[in-house]
Each structure stands twice: as C-alpha cells, then as structure tokens.
Amino acid sequence: MNRLIECVPNISEGRDAKKIEQIVSAIKQTPNAVLLDVDSDHDHNRTVITFVGDDLSVEKAILALTEKAIALIDLNHHQGEHPRMGAVDVIPFIPIKGATMENCIALAQRVGKQIWEKFRFPVYLYEEAATRPERKDLSNIRKGEFEHFAQKILESDWAPDFGERKIHPTAGVVAVGARMPLIAFNVNLGTDNLEIAKKIAKAVRHSDGGFRFVKALGFALEERGIVQVSMNMTNYKKTPLFRVFEMVKREAERYGVSVIGSEIVGLAPQEALDQVADFYLQLEDFQSEQILENRLEHAQTKS
Amino acid sequence: MNRLIECVPNISEGRDAKKIEQIVSAIKQTPNAVLLDVDSDHDHNRTVITFVGDDLSVEKAILALTEKAIALIDLNHHQGEHPRMGAVDVIPFIPIKGATMENCIALAQRVGKQIWEKFRFPVYLYEEAATRPERKDLSNIRKGEFEHFAQKILESDWAPDFGERKIHPTAGVVAVGARMPLIAFNVNLGTDNLEIAKKIAKAVRHSDGGFRFVKALGFALEERGIVQVSMNMTNYKKTPLFRVFEMVKREAERYGVSVIGSEIVGLAPQEALDQVADFYLQLEDFQSEQILENRLEHAQTKS
C-alpha cells in the first residue's frame, strides 16, 4: 500500500463480545481496509479498534462501522469508567505513510459530513481538524458526556460542525478528527516514591512547561513496588522518544533514582524507533532507504 | 513476500557500464527477483549487485546472471585492485526474513551444483556452506587468485566442491556460500591520532580477542582530519551494533577522545536498528509486532 492512513475509532461497548464482533466485522468486510487491533476494556466498557488503509477504503470502512455501532449501542444503558459522549465516541484519522496531515483533515471533514447526512449523528471536528481553538482538545468537547449533551448542544458555543442542535437519541454525538500517531510510552523508576514520578511527569509535560508534545502522569506500580512516568507522545516527529527519555533519566538522577526500564504500550510507527537508533549511534547522514526492507518496498513500488 | 533471501554476487567488471547493465538485466528479467543495488568500483574493477526474492526466484536469477557474466567477462584481461578468482567471484545467500541459515545453505548447494553442471564453472562452498573448516574464510579460497588457480585447483586440499580440477578458461572459479547479513559500521573519533583508531579496532575485533562477529581496522579520514574505526559486523543478532558502539566509546574515553559520529554504509536489516532502540530505551518486553508496519504486513499475509 502506497498511502497509509490509520483510523482508531473508540466505541462505547467493551463487554458484549458478540456486539463488538458485529461492529468490527464492518472493517473486515471492506476491501483494502486492514484490521490491526481490537482492544476491549471491561471496566471502561469501551473498545479501541485500529485499522489502516488508503483514503477510500478507510472512509468506507468507518462509515460501515458507524452504522453498525449506532444500530447496536444505546448510550442510555451504557455505564463505564471512561468518559464518553457517543456510541462511536471518537474517530481520529492518522497519517502513517505517504499521507499528510492535510489529507487526514480533508478525510475527517468528508466523513463527518456523511455521518451527519446518513445517520443524523451530530459531529464535532477535533484536534488538527478542529474549526475553533477550544475544540482542539477532545476532553473540552466531551465535558458533560452523553448525559448532559442534550443541553450542551444548545449552548451558543457548542453547535456541532456537522448536524443540527439535537443529539442522536441513542448514539449521542461523535468527535471526528485528525492527529499524529500517539505513542504510549512509560518509563519505570527504581523507587517506590510516587512523588518523584509525579515531579518528573510535571517536568516533561507540556501543560507545566515541558515538551510541546508530551502528556505525562506519575503512577505507582503497586505489584512491582516501583513508580512510573506514564506518557502520551502526541507527535514523535517533533518531540522524539529519545529526547524525553534522556530528560526523564536526567531528572531521576537528581533524586538519586535510576531508570530501570521503559515500555511502549500498543503500536508505534517504525520511524519512531529508527529515530532512537539514529540518535544513540550518532549516525551521520543515515537515510531510511538504507534499511533493506524500505529499499525493497521502494523497488517493488517502482516496478 | 513472506520468505526473503538476499543474494549479493560480486562480478569482476566495474568499468564497462554496458557489460554491467547486460549482466544486471538478468536479475531484472526474473519474476519476483527485486534488484536493490548495483555498486561499481572503477579501481577495484568490480561490481557488487544486491537483490532479493524467495528461494526459487533467487535461484533462477543468479543462474541467469552467472551465464551472462561468463559470456561477457574474460579474467585473462582483467585488472583491478580487489583480489578475485572468478568472473562471478563470490555468491553469498543471506537469510533476511522468514528464512533460516539452513535454507540458505541448501540454496548454495543447489545453485553450486547447477553452476558446475550448466557452465563447467568450478564451485567452492564457503562460510556457513563450507564443507571443511579452511574453506569457511573466503580469503583462504581466493589466495593465489585467477592467475594461480590453474595450479591451486590441482593441490590435494583444493578440489572444488562441485566440478573437476580444471578452472574455466576465461571465468576461473567461483565461491558460493551462505552467511548472515553483513553491516558496514564505522565509528568516527574526534582526533587525528591514527594509533588510537588502530588500538580500538584491535580491542573490538574477533581476531585479536574482541567480539566474535566483528572485523575492524583503524583508518585516517584525511579530508576531515579525524580517524575512524571501520567495522564489518558479520552477525548483528549475536554481536549487536549497540554493544560494539558502547565499547568503542568506552575505549576512546580512555584516551580522552570522544566519538563524534557513526556511519552505516549501504544496507542494514530493520531488525539491526530495532535492537538499538530497544537497548537504549531499556524497553521491557517490546515485540516486533508492536511496530505498526510489521503488524500490517502480518495482517495482510493472513488475509
């Protein structure tokens, strides 16, 4: 596949395996859409679905999935720990290869328009596709959740980007947007002192003056008796993993604590790891075309 | 492609672009063989050709290339700086993905047998495909080169693995073998003191007590006014790049010298770089399936 766009719809059903399977099958039945991952969480009562494809197949697949989810999920009877406002709660489009952010924004607009027109399911555009600054942040849109959205949608600032000021009676509203791939990256510290993890999280996260594309929290890993700086890397191209890792290590040193390991949770694009190798080996002029697998793909595309 | 074997024939022609093109076209005309690189050296009068494919296409392509090279190259009129004994001088098969060393050894035997039977071009099996210890090292086989091989082939120890004790009159003899991918990896030092590069090369190379799969030399990079530890990493799985890089850095420290950069020359398998990221980020339990591109390939293969 030459152009690769990822789509990660989150649906508000994490318990009923039969319903989840029916909804996911919409992806499997779409030609050229490739299902990569289905991750259901019982406590959250939510499933995160990951698939990829070119523009057209991703568009077809997400519309089919949305139709199925609306038919099967009724938010009036949904309970779970994770905040949510829609049967399909959020639909991000993510450029992976041969696609730009602009392609993904255009796709979000095209899909958002159809979701309203076909299903009467009101749409808010978010992140890079947002039409106003206060809609960039998904949590701003979601505030109040399904239970209060019938009111919120009437407020002057909260007219949907596509749709009338009336929630779908069972499906609520949905956020559709474009963003960079998100990498869940955790660094484990050799201490049980939670304060240290919290201080380091504060030092590196954007909201407190740290790196532009890092969200971070400090957690205790009770069973292991250690603490963790748990991060979402929201743009690995501009804020690379190695830079944040080095900063966490340096801050930990200050407290006499060492980094004992790290984790990437879920998927990461190859490029995010290649950056790390490039940095630590101090490579001069290394081109991604020097990686044998990339050269092969390039040669096959030409022929 | 599910099973990926690389083949890197070296031919004894690096000057006549027309002849080189004719020889290389044998690869291009073989279905499912993908040409990755052609690197001609005028002084060496030698061309290194890199291509990949599954077992069958690699077998077909290398036989077609050998036939062309024998027809076009006459070693009686060949001069160049690089030692050589055959029109096609050496043919290594290299497991890249979904293929084992055993697959490549079997391929070397199959191809070697046919090269003798079809072209009367005597074959020595080398490296992992070698039939005796003294034939593992290519330079042992090549000693004497084309000019003395009519004699050498008669010596008791030097009967070919496939063929009679008589060189091909214009093409000589060829070495066919199996090996791991070779990565050319150079580390640059912030000094013009060649002795330091030589001492570090000696410290890390196998022949002087260093790492099992490292060959190393110290060189001066005159134009840049620095020196370099120039290495061939002959098995990145067992002797990974990061370990050798760290050792070079540590040895350089001893002389008060710093590492100012490194280079990978030519191609490297993706896995060799993934190892580096894994090491420096101290990743816990990272699986190659967590790389989005790998997951996609896996999903496509299943469907």
Image (cartoon, coloured by chain):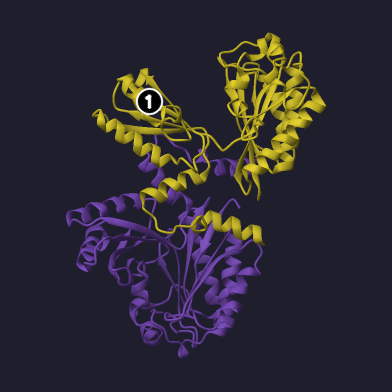
Chain colours: A purple, B yellow
Q: In the rendered image, is residue B152 in sight?
A: yes
**Can you tell which quarter of the image residue B217 is in?**
top left
Please provide percent x and percent y for residue A143: 34, 79
B12 relative position to A80: left or right: right
Residue found at the far bottom of this picture: A77
Above or below, B10 against A46 in this view is above
Give me the residue at 45% from left, 41% from top.
B240
The residue where tag 1 is placed is B228
Please provide percent x and percent y for residue B66: 73, 26
Crowdedness of circle 1 by 10 Å Cα count: few (<14), some, many (20+)?
A: many
Please provide percent x and percent y for residue B167: 74, 16
Q: Secondary structure at mark 1?
A: strand
Q: What's under tag 1, amino acid-wise?
A: Gln
Between A64 and B279, the residue placed more toward the observer is: B279
Between A294 and A191, the residue placed more toward the observer is: A191
**Can you tell which quarter of the image residue B295 is in?**
bottom right
